[in-house]
Amino acid sequence: MLSEQTQKAFIKIYVLLILNLEFWFFSLMGLIVLGIGPALRTITEQFLTYGYDYRQYTFKKLWNFYWKIFWQANSRALPLLALMLFLFYDIYLTSQIKAAWMLPVVFLIIFVLFITCMVAINVLLLDSNFEIEFKNVFKLAFIQFFSDIRALGLCLTGLIIISALTALWPGLLLFLTFSTTVVWANHSYRNWIKQIDGKIS
């Protein structure tokens, strides 16, 4: 029994390694800026399709899928990435101003950045599970942020743990961080996805 459980654990870690390395490869293929969105979409949708069946993760399948969704994924990812960069820059600028009245402004920008990050995760999950129009995918993703606090809390807790472990061991960025984030987000919002699937069906 122990050896069987150990084998399952190794298989799961192996799949996460494959997905994370594929994320970096495809991100570099798109010169980072144009690669991050399609890379995340590729590993997310492939995991939803094949789970922990490591034999299914062939380079050819991933390669073909990456180029198939390249421009659609970027149409979602680039506006969100641009907004995140703008907010990060705003936080940097406002933090340079040494005035007490700027503190609430900094916290407000951080909160907006947090919402943007969570909406980006929801957009990724929606696009990977369903075919939804551009405006509707953002609308649904934004509504979800406020409609299911339990799922949000579960996802956020996992993201904090993943971030803390990555800060302790930066090497995880290369091997596990992004794939684990994708898998955890999918786990956290699985009931929400099922609800949408039920309504569509």
Image (spheres, rainbow, N blue to C red):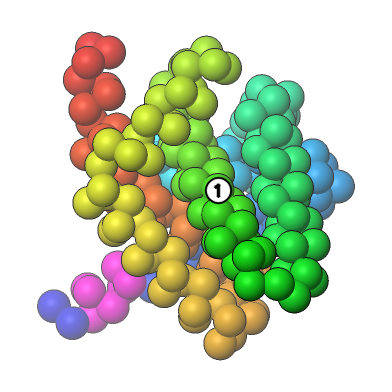
Q: How busy is the neighbourhood of tag 1: few (under 14 within 10 Å), some, or many (20 plus)?
A: some
Is residue 53 among what the camera can see? no
For residue 171: magenta?
A: no
Residue 180 image offset from top left, x and y in percent: 46, 62
Q: Residue at x 56, y 77 (%)?
A: 166
**Residue 10 image point, x, y percent:** 38, 73
* Residue stretch in magenta: 3-9
User: Residue furthest toward the bottom?
Assistant: 168
Q: Is residue 12 above or below residue 133?
A: below
Q: Is residue 8 magenta?
A: yes
Image coordinates for residue 39, horizontal then vertical, percent: 65, 44
Q: Can see residue 195?
A: yes
| Residue 15 drawn above or below residue 142 | below
50 over 7 or under it: above or below: above
Query: Mark 1 is on which residue type?
Result: Val
Name the one closer to the observer, 155 or 5: 155
Query: In which quadrant of the rendered view does residue 197 lie?
Result: top left
Residue located at (55% from left, 54% from top): 108
